[in-house]
Image (tube, rainbow, N blue to C red):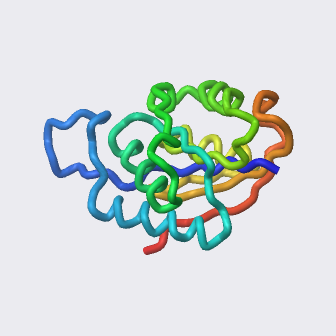
Amino acid sequence: MRYIILMRHGKSDWSEGGVSDFNRPLSERGIRDVLQQGQQLLREGHRPDYILSSPAIRAWHTAHLLAQVCSLPHEAVKGIMDFYRERDDAILEALRSLPSEIQAVALIGHNPLWSYLASRWKGETLELSTAEIIGFAWEGEWQAFSGRGVQFAFYLRRMG
């Protein structure tokens, strides 16, 4: 069984005017939420082997905080520009390119795409809030991933 862990980036900081959307950082609350959610993920018995992330600053920081909590080396985090561009076909391409030894992968990105994927794979409408995590199980090799046959595994709503 393989696991796909979808995580929306932590809450971003809107206080600095003139910062582009791509360069918007995490807020203090965003950092705290990501760390708490990562710890909860581990308590629930889920640990990614690898993290694929949008390279936008708030998502990239989220990915590296999750890597830290999960004791992953920062080399286990890879940026995918098309996650920022919200191309759903980029998700399929990224998953299909994973090596077979990866059993669990975390995908860090943005709404509306992340809520769309979570809704499509769970079969009901969901709206992921910042730092929320939803996990799916899938049997098969990554190279054959099509998005079909994905099974809901868990949902970690943000605390507080």
User: Which residue is drawn at the image coordinates 73% and 45% (left, top)?
Assistant: 121
User: Which residue is drawn at the image coordinates 76% and 55% (left, top)?
Assistant: 152
In the rendered picture of this protein, how many numbered marks are placed on residues? 0
| Quadrant that contains the C terminus | bottom left
Give x and y (percent) for residue 142: 76, 34
- Please say if 70 is above or below 45: above
Give x and y (percent) for residue 15: 17, 51
Which residue is farthest left?
17
Of 156 and 112, the residue lying toward us: 156
Give x and y (percent) for residue 114: 56, 43
Q: Is residue 4 left or right of residue 21?
A: right
Give x and y (percent) for residue 40: 55, 70
- Please say if 101 is above or below 84: below
- Please say if 10 is above or below 18: below
- Please say if 140 is above or below 3: above
User: Which residue is drawn at the image coordinates 64% and 41% (left, top)?
Assistant: 117
User: Which residue is drawn at the image coordinates 45% and 26% (left, top)?
Assistant: 81
